[in-house]
Image (spheres, grey):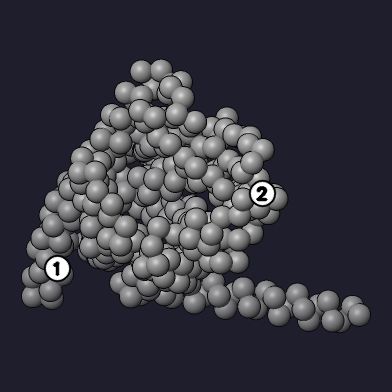
Amino acid sequence: MSNNTTIPSKTATDICLTDRQMSLSVSSTEGVLIGTIIPILVLFGISGNILNLTVLLAPNLRTRSNQLLACLAVADIVSLVVILPHSMAHYETFETALWFRKFYGKYKFQIIAMTNWSIATATWLVFVICLERLIIIKYPLSVRKQAKFFTPRNVVTIIVVTTFILTSYNHVSHACAEKLFCNGTQYHVACLGIDSERWFRNEPNPNSEFMKSVVRVAPQVNAIFVVLIPVVLVIIFNVMLILTLRQRTKLFEPSKTIRGDSQFTQLQSKTEHKVTITVTAIVTCFTITQSPSAFVTFLSSYVHRDWVTLSAICTILVVLGKALNFVLFCLSSASFRQRLLMQTKQGILRKSTRYTSVAAHV
């Protein structure tokens, strides 16, 4: 349901707003950072994550870890797609376009809600992936006991539903008033938090005290359970994973190979070790790129300040982290590179065969 309110006025429709009043950027610095850098990272990130999915969802590679990594790729793609309108709003072409201003003005907070939801889902998925790797390495027998309930489908469903509930307050946190200026050529939207003391036209706030309380408390709950806790847990478990990985690396040295181990067991252990290296690279990158944004978000829910430039830099780091997953897969996994190259060759071969058969029938 739309939370936009139209305020009619006979005198204001002839008034033309200035470029600054029509600007969708808070500052020129934000416009440069979000409008210039983000689109490049978004396009690269979407393309890279799609390539990740083509390998991870191959019929012979659908392991538990790959399924979780595939879900992470989907969450990252959704995050990158919904971030794009915020970046487009900093371009003059879209900033002055009536259709874009109406779309962005009416659905801005819904887009923010979708962005927060997908990022929260990705954050908890990274934690689960890190935890799953750690359990597999340290307690391999316990994985089989818990595998029936803690399937990727069940885990992902719980994460998606829970994060949706925790971030859903964004859909109702603001009410917006829309108005046309300059003889209908300029569309402008003004928004107020539903817990604001003053309302449009200086009228009393019509929202209930319950809704006001929900909107006041929800950002703090969101900051704790969606931002602070998962990021801190990821940092802790990532350190544990790196330490465990260093210990296991010594086991694969030729001089320290246990003679009693079967060839199959050694091969399986090496495979798990390689997967763990890839996961560690992804989780480490996540920790570096997402932590600043997490702590700024957490602080902003308690310290009411404008973090415009800092928030823009943190947003770039978040998008960069999601865009780098493809690079990390390629750098940390030789098997991923081989499978991607093989699938690319097969795709080219199928297209050339199809083109040859079509040409033969012409």
Q: In this view of the protein, which residue sits in the foreground, 94 or 288?
A: 94
Q: Nearer the viewer, mark 2 or mark 1?
A: 2
Helix, strand or loop under label 1: helix
For label 2, the crowd category at 10 Å Cα-Cα, with few meaning under 14, some 14 to 19 and many 20 or more, is some
- Residue 308, by quadrant, is bottom left
Q: Which residue occupies 37% across, 72% down?
A: 327
Q: Is residue 342 above or below residue 222?
A: below
What is the quadrant of residue 261 in the picture?
bottom left
Question: Residue sitting at 14 percent across and 68 percent down?
Answer: 249
Would you say residue 114 is visible in this rendering? Answer: no
Q: Which residue is mark 1?
A: 249
Direction from residue 214 to residue 21 in the image, left or right:
right
Q: Residue 184, can we see it?
A: yes
Q: What residue is at 84 percent from the left and 81 percent from the top?
A: 359
Residue 207 position (above or below residue 17): above
Instruction: Tell me where residue 238 appears, x and y as whole percent.
Output: 18, 56
Provide residue 309's location: percent of width, then percent of height: 30, 62
**Which mark is first along the chain, 1 or 2?**
2
* Gap between marks 2 and 1 measured at Cα: 73 Å
Residue 90 position, x and y percent, is: 49, 63
Q: Residue beneath label 2, please?
A: 14
For image coordinates 35% across by 45% down, the residue present is 120
Kind of residue at badge 1: Thr
Image quadrant where one finds the C terminus: bottom right
Q: Which mark is residue 212?
A: none
